[in-house]
Amino acid sequence: MQTLRDTLLSASQKYESLMGKCDQDLKEYKTYSACQMGTLKVKVESQESLMAEHRKIIEDVQKQLQDFHVIYSSKAETEKLKKDVSSLVKDVGNNHLICLQDLQRELKSLLNLLKDDVIKNKFETETKFASLIEQIEENFHVTKLDKEGVLKEVRIYEKTIFIIEKKIENIYTLIERINKRGEACHKPE
């Protein structure tokens, strides 16, 4: 009997331990499942909002298609719209072409004016350059004439000085001769 009691006590302890573990596992599962349910709920809500946005986009596209069909119900109206848009594009293209042609004409006139100015400036520069060359050549010629004239004058002065020096030498020679004669004449005896 004692063994039976011991066995029963041991079994009841195991049962209580097992029940505690089961309660613990059950609490953990409840927490885990609540967390998973929250996550799934958030995912479902995001998918529902995404589906609502898609539904709204689809409805807008359907409405635009219906409105297009209502506004442009016939092929003739669509062709007319196409022609209107085409003529509008053509008009805009023509306006741009006209503006470009005006710009091209204005650019050509400006280039011609620039060309005329360049030719005029070239002519003026050549004229000024030619007058400067003439002035320089004239100044050079005058300088050359002055140099030749000065050299001529110097040669004349050199000859004149040479003649004067010869006359002075002659005078000294004559004075020496006179002095020699005078010495001979005026010698005290």
Image (cartoon, helix red, strand yellow):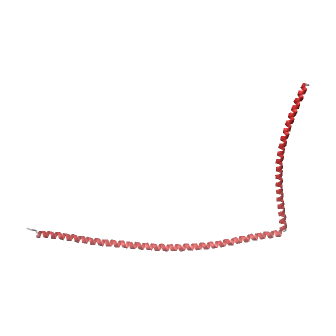
Q: Position of residue 58 (x, y in %)?
A: 83, 59
Residue ranking furthest to the left: 189
The image quarter in which residue 1 lies:
top right
Q: Residue at x 85, y 36 (%)?
A: 20
Name the residue located 84 percent from the left edge and 45 percent from the top edge.
Answer: 34
Question: Quadrant location of the C terminus?
Answer: bottom left
Q: Is residue 121 above or below residue 65?
A: below
Residue beneath the point at 57% across and 72% down: 115
- Image check: 113 left or right of 79? left
Residue 53 in the image: above or below residue 1: below
Q: Quadrant of residue 89?
A: bottom right
Q: Position of residue 127 (x, y in %)?
A: 49, 74
Q: As rendered, which of 109 and 12 lies closer to the eye?
A: 12
- Observer able to see residue 95: yes
Across and down, in percent, residue 56 comes to 83, 59
Asked if residue 72 can be seen in this view, the reply is no
Residue with the most extreme right position? 1
Using the image as rendered, state which of residue 109 and residue 5 is in the foreground: 5
Q: Is residue 64 left or right of residue 180?
A: right
Q: Position of residue 172 (x, y in %)?
A: 20, 69
Nearer the observer, 24 or 55: 24
Q: Is residue 164 left or right of residue 33?
A: left
Seen in the picture, residue 89 relative to 44 is either above or below; the reply is below
